[in-house]
Image (tube, grey):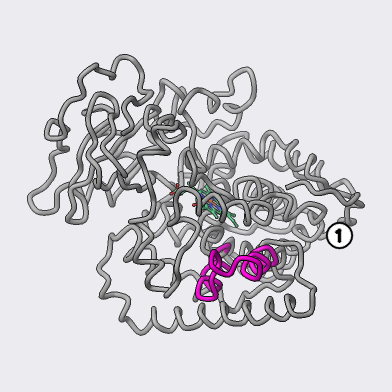
Amino acid sequence: MATSAPAPDEVRTSAPKATDKIPDVPGLPLLGNTLEMARDPAAFFLRAYRDYGPVYRVNVFGRRTIVIAGPEASTFMTTRDGRDSLRSKEFWGDFVDFHGASKTLTGEDGKTHEKLRRIMRHGFSKAAVAGQYHRLAQITDEAIERDWLSRPQVPVVEAYQYLIVAQLGEIMTGHAPLEYVPDIRLNILYLLNTLVARTRPKILLHRPEFKRANARVNELGRDMIAEFKGHAAAGTLPSNLLGDIMHAHETDPDLIQERDLALLLTGPYVAGLDTVANTIAAATYGILKTPGVLERVQAEADALYAKDVVTEQDIHNLPAINGAIMEAMRLWPIAVAQMRTAIEDFSFAGYTIPAGEMIYIGTSVPHFMEEYFPEPERFDIDRYQRPRAEHLQKGAYSPFGRGPHSCLGQSLAEVQMAATVSRIFHRLDLALPSPDYVLKTKSAPTPGPSMDFKVRVLGERRPARALKPEQREEKSDG
Ligand code: HEM
């Protein structure tokens, strides 16, 4: 049994309080806290943390669920107690069953999870785009022609969704399945809402629009399996995520079973589509809304693309652009809370959390606390520079989650987002619909800017000058 949580001293007591002492956050009759949570989950978790401390119980979507929140909870997830006490299995079970699969990365824990992560680590890392920044720029230019210059107002989240699928598809398969974007989006929306977050009833899965989208994503999965089986037979499996998955299926068919392939091969779209598109849409808003930021982003982007060759180092060396993306992830986190089950009784911040309880872990709460991020509502792209480095305080900043299930695509997402935002602002003169425009947000299936957030394309700032490929020495940087 896990006995001690590394909570700050002021919340730790020597004799843990019983579960029935966990404070309930009062809500409406029947609905409980559902409306407040649906309106703005991050604000709700923060308010409850302020009012009740790092452990409280909410009543949302017809379920009473324990929340552990704040820097204490973020830190706890990375400790041995946290690893031993929490698991993801229960939340993903219905999703895995729906696909007729035996497992998926997000729903496994312990040794099997470690094995799966090892197989996919390289393919999901920034190594996947090493030497391909010229391609990322070219794909972005194609999207600019297709989706941005062709209309005066662009729905930002949707336009980025197409761009992300094009990039991930090219990187991982050499082919961008753009014709499947609406289906992938709809599929994710329904499956995450009904089977994982369980904020909508399962009956919705009988709707014809979902069935159609699901059949199309299955078709994409079948095509990808056929293509990669062909590669495996010909001995031409590429060294990328899909190649690595297919190779593992051949060498360890019990671990990666035939029935797991479709889910695993289409996984990057599920993991990358909403997350990246929402985040760079939010960054786009912050850049256009905050006085003085646009000029700095443009200057940095212009200096970057004045080069003939762009390297990973160049992408990391963009303080204004990377600062804007980090601010977007702080203020509009795509994972406001992580969902887990208690494997065993454990003690946290002076309470006993009983085995079997479903738990929300409010890792984004500190993002909005002035103790960690002064003037937390301000989009301040310089927070992350030393000596301030506000995100490095213990438990303060967790946009990619914490612990064993933390984002496997983090390093890939970081360079993909910086390369994309820089190219968009280098090429295009953008503006908000009006200077006093205020971003509206959505909370499902992934929190982020609402789908009707549009920007005006005032014109083209710079032409689409092609980059030269980077000459790289072969090295195995996973
Ligand atoms: C802004 C971009 C992104 C953010 C903020 C983000 C955030 C997250 C978070 C918070 C988790 C943990 C969920 C949990 O603990 O329950 C996660 C997991 C994961 N992410 Fe990301 N993600 C991003 C982009 C991507 C991309 C582009 C990929 C790959 C193409 C990716 C692949 C994954 C995978 C495979 C996992 C599951 C890891 C596991 O269960 O072991 N992510 N991500």
Residue 266 falls inside the magenta stretch: yes
- Image-based side of 78 in relation to 382, left or right: left
Quadrant in the picture for residue 208:
bottom left
**With respect to residue 474, does 377 lie above or below?**
above
Q: Which range of residues does the magenta coloring cover?
A: 242-268
User: What kind of secondary structure does the magenta stretch mostly adopt?
Assistant: helix
Picture coordinates of residue 335 (x, y %)?
A: 43, 47
**With respect to residue 318, does 405 lie above or below?**
below
Q: Which residue position is annotated with label 1?
A: 466
Picture coordinates of residue 300 (x, y %)?
A: 75, 39
Q: Residue at x 64, y 50 (%)?
A: 417
- Image-based side of 466 in relation to 10, left or right: right
Is residue 473 something that shows in the picture?
A: yes
Q: Residue at x 27, y 71 (%)?
A: 202
Secondary structure of residue under mark 1: loop
Picture coordinates of residue 95 (x, y %)?
A: 39, 66
Label 1, residues with CA under 10 Å away: few <14, some 14-19, many ≥20: some
Picture coordinates of residue 120 (x, y %)?
A: 62, 56
Is residue 437 something that shows in the picture?
A: no
Q: Residue at x 52, y 54 (%)?
A: 275
Q: Residue at x 36, y 54 (%)?
A: 443
Q: Pick the residue in front: 255 or 473.
A: 255
Quadrant in the picture for residue 424:
bottom right
Looking at the rendering, in which quadrant would you find the N terminus? top left
Residue 118 falls inside the magenta stretch: no
Quadrant in the picture for residue 71:
top left
Q: How many marks?
A: 1
> Which amino acid, mark 1?
Ala
